[in-house]
Amino acid sequence: MDIKIAVFTNNDGITENMGKEGHICFFEKKDDVWQIYKKEAFSPGTGIVTLRKDYTELADMLDGCRIFVAKVISGLAFNVMDRKGIHLWEFEGRPEAFLDQVARGEKAYKKELEGMDESGLVSYYVKKDEGKYAVDVHSLMKENGDLTSKKILKPFFKTKKFYELEAIFDHIPPWLYKELEGFGLTMDVLSEGNGKSVCLIRPAVCDDSI
């Protein structure tokens, strides 16, 4: 599988912090060598409204390239781009020093998600009734540092038919808002506060075969 990676760099070709001026360099591997196939200037403005617009346009500028690397990606930049479904990495240095590592990490993550079938999810979820489940994402991530909300939820969405899923988070992950529609799901926030958010996730169209 061909992997394309976008890297935010300064004029010296070294990764730069988001929020500063720089260039988006688009890399792909040809004949075992990483090459730039496109380069775009990026200069964010000031103020939350302007920055949100700029980072949204940046995510759209990636045009199908879903992997983005910068020296530091935090705050608004992270939230906007993560919600757009961009896979974010932080590295300091020249791209040729870390692109292979990013590519390996992406392939390993995809393989891990694909390899998690329904049997691997049983211990994460509580069956409340026929087609109704609950999962405490916050507690699972706290107990196991290798788990993320994506690792817990995405395989379930892909492999399990259900009427409703009650999910508990410390905060609702931004990617969930962006990607639920792609799974044919909707979400209602039941409660928020005191470091806990409870959501109810349901199919957008009810499946009578459950």
Image (cartoon, rainbow, N blue to C red):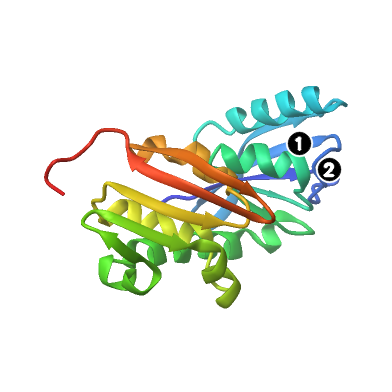
* Placement of 74 over or under 181, stated as above or below: below
Give the spatial CA distance, label 2 vs label 1. Answer: 6 Å
- Circle 1 sits on which residue? 23
Amino acid type at mark 1:
His
* Placement of 121 over or under 72, stated as above or below: below
Residue 6, given in percent of the width and then of the height, sits at 63, 43
Label 2 crowd (10 A; few <14 / some 14-19 / many >=20): some
Residue 9, given in percent of the width and then of the height, sits at 78, 44
40 displayed left or right of 49 = left
Q: Which mark is residue 150?
A: none
The residue shown at (34%, 61%) is 114
Find numbered disc 2 in the image and state the secondary structure of the residue it sits on: loop
Label 1 crowd (10 A; few <14 / some 14-19 / many >=20): many
Name, please, the residue furthest toward the left: 209
The residue shown at (66%, 25%) is 57
How many numbered circles does the render carry? 2
The residue shown at (73%, 43%) is 8
The mark that comes first in sequence, 2 or 1, is: 2
Image marks 2 and 1: residues in contact by CB distance under 8 Å: yes
**Observer-nearest of 85 and 136:** 136
- Circle 2 sits on which residue? 10
Quadrant of residue 183 within the rendered picture: top left
Amino acid type at mark 2:
Asn
Find numbered disc 1 in the image and state the secondary structure of the residue it sits on: strand
11 displayed left or right of 25 = right
* Placement of 191 over or under 43, stated as above or below: below
The residue shown at (39%, 64%) is 111
Residue 154, given in percent of the width and then of the height, sits at 40, 54
48 displayed left or right of 140 = right
